Amino acid sequence: MEIPTQLTPAFDPAALAALRDLNPGDDSFFQDLVQIFLDDSPQRIAEIEQSLVKGDARQLMLAAHSLKGSSANFGAERLRALSEQLELLGRQDSFGDAPAQLRALKDEFTRVRAALEALLPGK
């Protein structure tokens, strides 16, 4: 039984603390990492979407793999898991459930983005 999305955190606070600890006392590095993730992820999602339109399993695998890794860095576990499922579909050259997975991934990214933007000054 899957836990409802609204009951799970968008990201793991311990993962964010670990990123902040990379440059203790100066949150600007952490803020830069968050901004890079927020800027890059929509591009990876667009690549996933294009790969489905083109039927390009390799592009699907690579874009989903990239998003999986960056999501893991932020402890965005559900986003990471959805990315991994899409990566596997690309690896298997199977697009069966990919459109539904992409919708779920977009919804989860919206949730993660809102939670991360709330951590940035002026947002």
Image (spheres, rainbow, N blue to C red):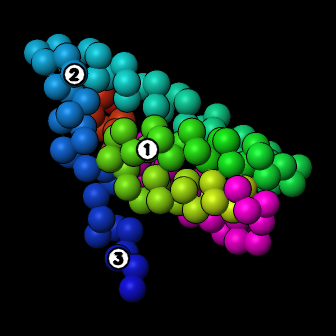
Q: Nearer the viewer, residue 66 or 111?
A: 66
Of all residues shown, which one is farthest toward the left? 25
Quadrant for the C terminus, please: top left
- Find disc 3 in the rendering and name its residue: 3
Question: Which is more N-terminal, label 2 or label 1?
Answer: 2
Specify start and end residues of the magenta stretch as a single range: 91-114
- Above or below, 2 against 37 in this view is below
Mark 2: amino acid? Leu
Would you say the magenta stretch is mainly helix, strand or loop?
Answer: helix
Secondary structure found at label 1? helix
For the point 25% across and 30% down, the residue is: 19
From this view, report whether residue 103 is shown above or below residue 11.
below
Give the image location of residue 17, x and y in percent: 18, 35
Q: Which residue is mark 2?
A: 22
Residue located beneath label 1 in the image: 71
Lower sequence index among marks 1 and 3:
3
Q: Position of residue 95 (x, y in %)?
A: 77, 65
Check if residue 119 falls in the magenta segment: no
Cα separation between marks 1 and 2: 17 Å
**Magenta-span inclusion, residue 101:** yes
Q: Residue furthest right?
A: 54
**Which class describes the residues within 10 Å of circle 2: few (<14), some (14-19), or many (20+)?**
few
- Asked if residue 53 shows in the view, the reply is no
Three-letter residue code for mark 1: Ser
Q: Amino acid at mark 3?
A: Ile
Q: Position of residue 10 (x, y in %)?
A: 34, 54
What's the residue at 58%, 45% (across, down)?
65
Numbered disc 3: secondary structure: loop
Q: Can see residue 94? A: yes
Tell me if label 2 and label 3 are in contact, CB under 8 Å.
no
Q: Are marks 1 and 2 in contact (CB under 8 Å)?
A: no
